Amino acid sequence: MSTPRLEVVEDERAAARRGAELIAEAGRRSVEKRGEFKLAMSGGRTPWAMLAILCDLEKMPWGETELFQADERVASPGSQERNLTHFVLALSLEHQAELVPMPVTQRELETAALQYEDLLPDRLDLVHLGLGPDGHTASLVPGDPVLDVTDQKVAMTEHPYQGCRRMTLTYPALDGARQILWLVTGEEKREPLERLIDGDTTIPAGRVRNEEMVVVADEAAAAGLSG
């Protein structure tokens, strides 16, 4: 496993723009090599801004892109708890067809997770991840049995987290991706970011094993660290 490469930018807005640029660059390379771009994104305020910026970047190959979810809360359609709700708001109408939502409204959620796994490619080209103050990423949350799933690329958390059970990509999906892009902003992320960069496996994020990882962080999160 390589140590994540750290890029530090001024603030949250700059982080969203840099993240969008890196995704677009990865998309262009993927289309040149394989004729398609399979992208998965997590939720969060900065990623939603990043997605909106991405819609306006001419070099982003939207026509060859499928956009998967890295995780989703089990909540009603249209709920503000749902990442999908914010994805739809951030995406322009012409790009919403590229979105492949996680089926979290089905009655049998474990079966739904397997169905979503069937929609994934053998390898995602790029997975965007966030980082929680507790070190979680996607919905791989501390203490949940989902951390130990090794035979599925998509699984359900066993316990509610912040009020909701979650559907999430698992370590096999993240480790198998061609590239991981972490987007980390805010002073409250300073400690978990340091632990991520140090490869601390006591936090869920630190257990991701991938050879191509870049972290885009703002100065508030990256104080004391150097790229």
Image (tube, grey):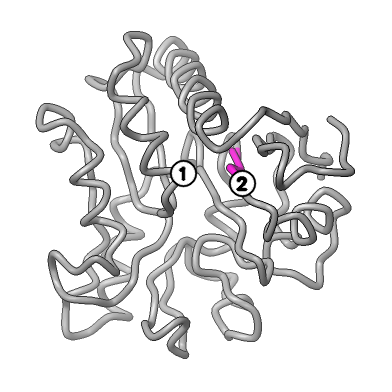
Q: Quadrant of residue 35?
A: top left
Q: Which mark is residue 88?
A: none
Query: Looking at the image, which residue is at 58% across and 61% down?
Result: 137
Q: Earlier in the sequence, mark 1 or mark 2?
A: 1
Q: Please determine whether, in this image, residue 79 is positioned above or below residue 56.
A: below
Amino acid of disc 1: Thr
- Tell me the element at label 1: helix
Q: Are marks 1 and 2 in contact (CB under 8 Å)?
A: yes
Residue placed most toward the observer, 132 or 23: 132
Residue placed most toward the observer, 53 or 154: 53
Q: Which residue is mark 2?
A: 185
Q: Is residue 111 left or right of residue 96?
A: right
Mark 2 burial class by Cα count in 10 Å: few <14, some 14-19, many 20+: many
Q: Which residue is mark 1?
A: 46
Q: Which residues are magenta?
A: 180-184
Q: Quadrant of residue 148?
A: bottom right
